[in-house]
Amino acid sequence: MKIISFIFLFTFFLGCKREEISICDDSIGLFTFSSYPIGTAIDIIELGNDPLYKSIAIKQFNSITPENIFKAEYLHPEPLFFNWTEADSLVSFCQNNNKRLHGHTLIWHQQLPQWILDYQGSTSDWEQLMKVHIQTIMTHFKNKVTAWDVVNEAFNEDGTLRNSIWKQKIGVSYIEKAFLYAKEADPNALLFYNDFNLESNPTKRNSVLALLNNLRNRGVKIDGIGIQMHISNYYPESTQIANSFQEIVDDNYKIHVSELDISVNPLGKDIVPSETLFNEQANLLGTVVINYNKIPKQYQYGITFWGISDKNSWIRSFYNREDYPLLYDDNYLPKPCYCKLLRTL
Ligand code: 9MR
């Protein structure tokens, strides 16, 4: 009897949810419909200044990636000084609202403080600098951050290693060392490698997998791969997405779709934002989600969007072009891609 009532209630509950889905109501959080975390990048200034931004962040997402404030130029502005103030306020926000916090990013060639760019020292001095940087940050956030993008964007599109400052000063072993230092600092944190175009460029993806597999064979802990997915209405194809997910899972890495946004105007033309463009965008998002749903559960770390509303997207300022890449429009109204996501999760 109990079982029958449970099934009845469950079906009724699902029925209610479906009804809401059909009218694309955003009053219930996206993440409540999902079996894996749904995340967003958070801009700490918007979070403090804009109540609507904050309420959508709380209601819709259960995983948070700091868009900028965990990067070296913010956290480690002087050799002997770490600035925890803003980052700690994001930690409190996550704890108070029961959100997972994803650490982005420890070792990257961009957004470095001037003192690192100017630093003079031997290879072992640079290794020490990297070790202190990684371990001070990870120790500070131990048990507060679930996972880290330990190394970000280390590869070129042709599959060679980017000649970043870290590679120049330490050599190719900087990637291995970064992961070793990270594991030493917090053995419980999940450790990710994060990069762009991994879904569309098999040459780059194969090189990344070859290097990570090689490190793993030598005992280095690497739990997952962040596949950023800054994509557009026109690219990539569903089969490319499916193949990339399959190859990464076959090699036994969790997948974080870590920075998802879908440009409707990748070439920066004069455009009129139209229903057609937004429906195409929604369909591509549906394709990403359908493919992600198919990967085994233990590999689904989650899908994170790179922002909330079109008006906050990095794309507009970075490329100085008209674009509408996110789930919410400039007035924080849910777009067709939001509705599609709700129906596809
Ligand atoms: O969204 C971030 C933007 O605010 C910064 O100005 C920019 C600096 O390069 O970095 C953006 O985030 C990047 C992320 O950290 C790594 N992958 C690419 C993202 C978009 O550039």
Image: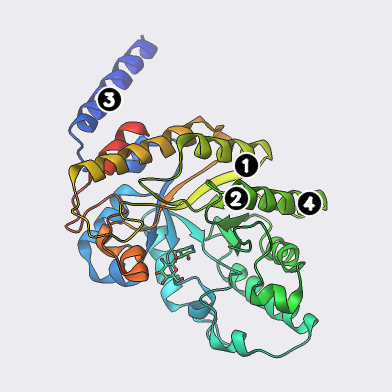
**Separation of residues labelled 2 and 3 (CA atoms):** 35 Å
Residue at mark 2 to residue at mark 1: CA–CA distance: 8 Å
Task: Identify the mark nearer the N-term, 1 or 3.
Answer: 3
Compared with residue 181, is residue 248 higher up or lower down, i.e. above or below? above
- Residue under label 4, please give it: 214
Q: Label for residue 248? A: 1
Name the quarter showing ligand 1.
Answer: bottom left
The kind of secondary structure element at disc 1 is helix
The mark nearer the N terminus, 2 or 1, is 2
Residue 229's place in the image compared with 41, above or below, is above
Inspect the image, locate mark 2, and give the three-letter code of the amino acid beneath it: Ile
Q: Pick whichever of labels 2 and 4 is earlier in the sequence.
A: 4
Mark carried by residue 225: 2
| Residue at point 35%, 58% (across, down) | 267
Give the Cα distance between marks 3 and 4: 48 Å
Mark 3 and mark 2 in contact (Cβ < 8 Å)? no
Q: Which residue is mark 3?
A: 13
Dot 3: element: helix
| Left or right of residue 340: residue 332 | left
Q: Say which quadrant the N terminus sits in.
A: top left
Residue 169, placed above or below residue 256: below
Q: Quadrant of residue 21?
A: top left
Residue 338 lies in quadrant: top left
Disc 3 vs disc 4: Cβ atoms closer than 8 Å?
no
Whichever of labels 2 and 3 marks the residue nearer the N terminus, that label is 3
Pointers 2 and 1 in contact (C-beta within 8 Å): yes
Residue 98 in the image: state x and y as whole percent: 40, 52
Q: Which amino acid is tagged 1?
A: Ile
